[in-house]
Image (tube, rainbow, N blue to C red):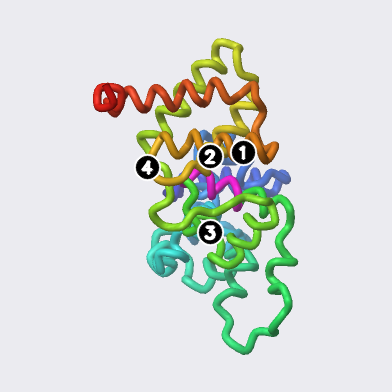
């Protein structure tokens, strides 16, 4: 939103060495409000031109618009061109659209350019979305390489655990964490590890836990708690009645 009545005040603040973000915080506005007001030509201020100020656009919105093919729409919302938004995409996404022969037997150059911080963000997006490669904020190939490097398995279509079952599992573990039975760091680890359960069968999950135990990927201390959570799902589904 443009506040013409505040443009001169914002201008004086800039001359005093303040950033748009600081001005926004002082006035209870967003950084976008301050930037758009300063870039606006009225009221006219002698020798003042703020067209060089970068319009702040959240990176998540840019990445989502890229995958959805709506960069032009996002540009209209923020009053910038599609090309301006495209230039703000992460390097690996902009490089992914280039055409030409790819060298064989070599890891893609864009993968080598990704920092550890960017890899952590890819992993975080992967888990927050319920393990969807399309939500990692990068290409499928890069996402798979990052997950493989981090030794995180990615599930094929149809293998994901149903969301309602995942909520039940997490609720059980969260309750034990609140009671001090499970350490928060252990809960954090298993809030991600549980997504590796495959199929829609709680009995198969118990088999997976045995495989993890034999492969030293799970401690004996956490098994009773996860097993209790699985039993809760079995009860909710009415399996006990069906087996009796």
Residue at the spot of label 4: 200
Label 2 packing within 10 angstroms: few (<14), some (14-19), many (20+): some
How much space separates mark 3 and mark 1, taking CA atoms?
Answer: 58 Å
Q: Quadrant of the C terminus?
A: top left
Q: Which is more N-terminal, label 3 or label 2?
A: 3
Residue drawn 44% across the image and 27% down it: 230
Q: Main secondary structure of the magenta part?
A: helix
Residue 43 visible in the displayed image? no
Q: Tag 1's secondary structure?
A: helix
Numbered range of the magenta stretch:
122-129
Reading the image, the residue beneath label 3 is 39
Instruction: Give the numbered dot on residue 208.
Output: 2
Q: Is residue 111 left or right of residue 195?
A: right
User: Which mark is drawn over residue 129?
Assistant: none
Q: Earlier in the sequence, mark 4 or mark 1?
A: 4
Depth check, front residue: 114 or 222 = 222
Label 1: which residue?
A: 212
**Tag in front: 2 or 3:** 2
């Amino acid at each position: 939103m443009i506040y013409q009545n505040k443009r001169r005040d914002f201008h004086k603040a800039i001359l005093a060495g303040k950033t748009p973000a600081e001005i926004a915080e002082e006035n209870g506005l967003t950084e976008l409000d301050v930037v758009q007001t300063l870039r606006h030509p009225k009221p006219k201020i002698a020798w003042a031109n703020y067209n060089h100020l970068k319009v702040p656009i959240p990176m998540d919105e840019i990445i989502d618009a890229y995958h959805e093919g709506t960069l032009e729409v996002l540009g209209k919302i923020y009053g910038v061109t599609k090309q301006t938004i495209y230039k703000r995409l992460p390097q690996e996404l902009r490089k992914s659209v280039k055409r030409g022969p790819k060298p064989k037997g070599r890891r893609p150059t864009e993968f080598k350019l990704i920092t550890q911080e960017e890899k952590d963000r890819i992993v975080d997006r992967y888990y927050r979305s319920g393990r969807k490669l399309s939500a990692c904020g990068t290409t499928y190939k890069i996402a798979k390489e990052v997950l493989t490097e981090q030794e995180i398995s990615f599930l094929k279509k149809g293998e994901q655990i149903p969301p309602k079952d995942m909520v039940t599992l997490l609720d059980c573990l969260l309750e034990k964490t609140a009671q001090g039975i499970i350490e928060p760091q252990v809960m954090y680890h298993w809030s991600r590890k549980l997504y590796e359960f495959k199929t829609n069968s709680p009995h198969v999950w118990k088999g997976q836990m045995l495989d993890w135990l034999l492969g030293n990927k799970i401690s004996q201390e956490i098994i009773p708690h996860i097993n209790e959570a699985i039993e809760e799902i079995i009860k909710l589904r009415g399996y006990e009645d069906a087996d009796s």
